[in-house]
Image (cartoon, rainbow, N blue to C red):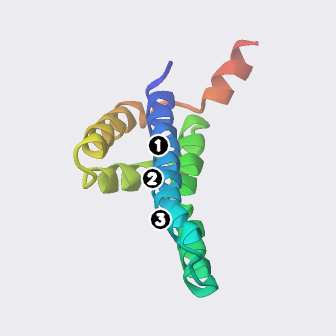
Amino acid sequence: MGNLEKAGRLLRLMGWLSLVGIAVIFAAIMIPILSDGGDAASFSEILFLGLLLLIIPAIYLITGRAIKQGKSWGKVAGVVKGCVSLLNVPIGTIVGIAVLFYLKKGWGEPDARLQISSEV
């Protein structure tokens, strides 16, 4: 497994973890509102905020896939996401350091799809 694939897997892991975290927080907010018979305005505002927050894991997942495929824009976006992850203490810091480390080591690696096709 190459360094870029490791970095991509770590970013995708962070994407799935943040998706689960958002779902848990969203459920913890929505269950009391729905059980108390909250008004539709607060329900729609929280629903909109929850949908808006789904952008965060989507960016992680898309960037991780692009890195695993060896796309140059994915590498740059991975560096940005790795730097932003450094601020998410403690797990994000560890993952951010690992992503930046693997991206630096694997920056010059060729596209994995080209290696497979040239071996055939």
Query: Residue 35 in the image: x percent, y percent?
Result: 56, 66
Residue 102 position (above or below residue 74): above
Q: Which of marks 1 and 2 is in front?
A: 1
* Name of the residue lying farthest toward the front: 36
Mark 1 or mark 3: which comes first in sequence?
A: 1
Which residue has dot 1 on it?
17
Question: Which residue sits at x=26%, y=38%?
Answer: 94
Of helix, strand and loop, which one carries label 2? helix
State the quadrant of the C terminus. top right
Can you identify the residue that label 2 sits on? 76
Tell me whether the residue at label 1 lies in contact with that at label 2, contact meaning CB atoms closer than 8 angstroms: no
Q: How far apart are marks 2 and 3 (CA)?
A: 35 Å
Q: Mark 2 belongs to which amino acid?
A: Val
- Where is residue 80? Give x, y as percent: 38, 56
Secondary structure at numbered mark 1? helix
Residue type at tag 1: Leu
Return the residue nearer the eye: 32 or 14.
32
Query: At 45% from the left edge and 57% from the top edge, which residue is drawn?
Result: 25
In which image quadrant can residue 71 be found?
Answer: top right
Q: Sort mark 1 into few (<14), some (14-19) or many (20+) by Cα contacts within 10 Å.
A: few
- Residue farthest bottom in this picture: 41
Residue drawn at (53%, 57%), measured in percent from left and top? 27
Look at the picture and state if 5 lies above or below 53: above
Q: Which amino acid lies under the numbered mark 3 shown in the image of this protein? A: Ile
Element under disc 3: helix
| Residue 96 coordinates in the image, percent (x, y) | 31, 43
Q: Mark 3 points at which residue?
A: 29
Q: Let me know if residue 29 appears in the view.
A: yes
